[in-house]
Image (spheres, helix red, strand yellow):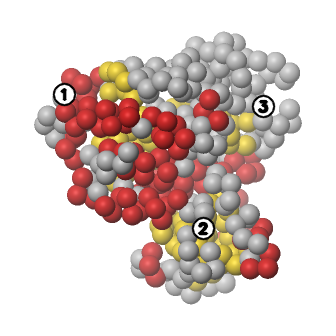
Amino acid sequence: MSAALPIQTLPQLQDSFACYREREPEPDKVIATYIWIDATGQNLRCKSRVLDSKPKKVEDYPDWNFDGSSTGQSSGHNSDCWLKPCAVFRDPFRRDPNVLVLCEVYQHDWTPDAHNKRHSCKKAMDAVKDQVPWFGIEQEYTLVDQSGFPHLWPQGGFPGPQGPYYCGVGYTKVNGRQIVESHLSACLYAGVKICGTNAEVMPSQWEYQVGPCVGIEMGDHLWMARFIMDQISEDQAVVVSLDPKPIPGDWNGAGCHTNYSTLPMREEGGIKYIEEAIEKLSKRHDAHIAAYDPSGGEDNKRRLTGLHETARIDQFSSGVANRGASIRIPRHCSAEGKGYLEDRRPASNMDPYVVTEIIVRTTLLNEK
């Protein structure tokens, strides 16, 4: 395993970009980094352009294009794809007034790209906006080296059994905390609705939480949090893996637990609506499993075994405070008779646009 470079804190990361800031042509120029999802449905791409001034709203950012033949999104003889800005965040690396611009991808004729899942998700969220659907997603991930072996695990061996690592503190308990802290600070600067972090059950595995977000905002903020994490890890000889089961055997996998509620669920007596939603989810279990990771469920088969705080992939289950169930009702929500449910089935590499859309279509639009 190659030696890791020294981990930088956010201020150090910002200082390392000083040379770029010094080369800015004019103080009133704005560097906009356009970001999009490529044909894998998982990897992000980006490129930057200089604007004469900072637009006041996302609709004012210019459409742009890119070579889709180099990202698997078009053929070489008709390669240009369109980038349509859809959400803007502050740039924590170049800092104000520079921005990160999340984009939807369209083909040359302005039809949505096959991997533009936001387009369909937005339609579903607009249809149920009176229900004010809230989402909170818990993104688990694993820090690994270039070979895929977990960051700072013993050379040619394994750490001690799981137990002391979850929310752990200390040199022998956690690996990569400075990356986590830099990511948290950068997301807060950017305006991403990140609300927490913690070390996970397997060493070198971590989690951050994003939300609550309303409707389409959930996918926008989680994808931007992923982009920021990838950029922070670039120069650290560390890879951020979203593999749902990075290490086989008696080690926890990685999920993307999705917390969900509607306005009626959050009001007095809301437990009735939570239970109704769970009943609807139970009837479309197979459709949700197919949507909950990019492989159509194959990646999740390695994770959803009924062990390591998961339900079995082939069985739907629910319960109060049960982390071995498909759907968990948190203890305090059961006690208060209102709140939200937690869908524990989505894999760590899921697309939040796909997951939030199918949940809304099943529970609110009553699709069968």
Could you tell me which secondary element the residue under label 2 belongs to?
loop
Residue 336, label in figure: 1
**Label 1 vs 3, first from the N-terminus:** 3
- Is residue 214 positioned above or below 326 on the image? below
Expressed as whole percent of the image width and height from the top left, the position of residue 21 reads: 66, 71
Q: Which residue is mark 2?
A: 113
In this view, the residue farthest toward the left is: 268
Q: Position of residue 38 (x, y in %)?
A: 67, 61
Q: Which residue is mark 3?
A: 149
Horizontal and vertical percent position of residue 167: 52, 24
Q: Which quadrant of the figure has residue 69? A: bottom right
Of the residues under marks 3 and 2, which one precedes in the sequence? 2
Q: Are marks 3 and 2 in contact (CB under 8 Å)?
A: no
Q: Nearer the viewer, residue 80 or 203?
A: 80
Residue at the spot 18% in from the left edge and 29% down from the top edge: 337
Say which quadrant the C terminus sits in: top left
Residue 12 in view: no
